[in-house]
Amino acid sequence: MTTVLTTQDVARLVQRVGLPDLLRRLVSYLEADYLRWAEFDKTPRVAAHSPDGVIELMPIADASLYSFKYVNGHPKNHRFGLPTVMAFGVLADVDTGAPALLSELTLTTAMRTAATSVMVAERLARPDSRVMALIGNGAQSEFQALAFHHVLGIRELRLFDIDPAATAKLVRHLSGTPGLTLTVCRSTAEAVQGADIITTVTADKANATIVTPDMIRPGQHINGVGGDCPGKTELHPGVLTAARVIVEYEPQSRIEGDVQQMPADFPVTEFWRVLAGQAAGRESAEQITVFDSVGFALEDFSALRLLRDLSVQLGLGSPLDLIPQMADPKDLFGELQITAQRQAA
């Protein structure tokens, strides 16, 4: 039997564990898997692009488990009452191919993206970072904000979105969060003033320049989350040339990240090397660092492992006859007849 976790199951899981603790657990699972980088069969995600968005499959496997995520990105979806990003995923047994877990990943993707951002920022941002500019206040913004507050100790958020209603929504959700100050700004340039960390999480599928070189200051860390497909960027090329740039999986980032704008020999470093001590993270207090995040299948693998473990621990999820349960596994046609007879009876 396959265990199914619905949106309601994941919401209950978050409620019972608590979002701060869940984000910390996600970070630990992510770190454990990134440290096993060489053990994974990796490939860039497979994408089907259209004028209004993209649909992608993100597969990865180690010797024991295989996972994939189906995910889209359609910035105009709010017009139809749908999220910009929707996702589900599967965790399967490599030895048999049997799907063990089928789970929603729309909520989970927002949490794993925030946890990944914090995991990398712990190695790239200055240890005394306390102020973050959050550019783009849409669906994923609260998750980024709370991850940086609870895990990294951010105390002030400087907020800007071209849609004031998005910022108002974020303020409504996060007002009253102990130890967190919210400052609403009139522009990106205003928001980044005095920020130790700049997080960009915009949605438009466009070669945008949300952050330009004149806005950045020595020592800042830039967490670029929104540039995640061909033709979609957030950072001016001059920001990248001024910084040490860290990516998840270089073959995918060259196609989808902000570094798609740069020459093929533009230097980037994969994060797993920083985590493993094979490459430096931040090299000085004055250095500008960029995490050019596009989202990688390993992060969903980690999230699905955590969902599996917590669902067993908390008794969440439902069994689903996704695969036929047969007395004779070679008699598939007979199973079809038996099922038809049962339905007729």
Image (tube, rainbow, N blue to C red):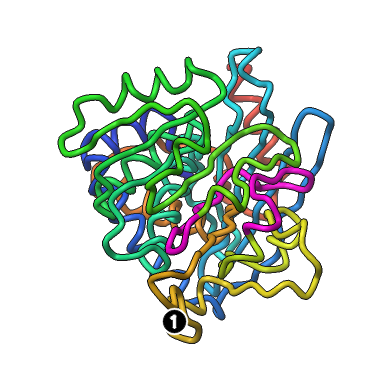
Of the pair 110 and 153, the residue shown nearer to us: 153
Q: Does residue 75 lie above or below 71 as drawn?
A: above
* In this picture, residue 260 sits left or right of residue 285: right
Of the pair 95 and 133, the residue shown nearer to us: 133
Q: Which residues are magenta?
A: 217-239
Residue that mark 1 sits on? 276
* In this picture, residue 24 sits left or right of residue 192: left
Q: Does residue 312 lie above or below 32 as drawn?
A: above
Q: Does residue 7 lie above or below 283 as drawn?
A: above
Of the pair 76 and 105, the residue shown nearer to us: 76
Task: Find residue 5 and report its horizontal and vertical position in percent.
Answer: 43, 37
- Farthest residue to the bottom: give it: 278
Is 236 magenta? The answer is yes
Task: Find residue 335 and report its horizontal and vertical position in percent.
Answer: 66, 40
Task: Find residue 24 and report its horizontal and vertical position in percent.
Answer: 28, 54
* In this picture, residue 223 sits left or right of residue 294: left
Residue 312 visible to an observer of this rendering: no
Task: Find residue 62 and report its horizontal and vertical position in percent.
Answer: 55, 71
Residue 332 visible to an observer of this rendering: yes
Is 200 magenta? The answer is no
Q: Residue shown at 28%/55% (left/top)?
A: 152
* In this picture, residue 213 sits left or right of residue 107: right
- Farthest residue to the left: give it: 178
Q: Does residue 196 lie above or below 83 as drawn?
A: below
At label 1, the amino acid type is Ala
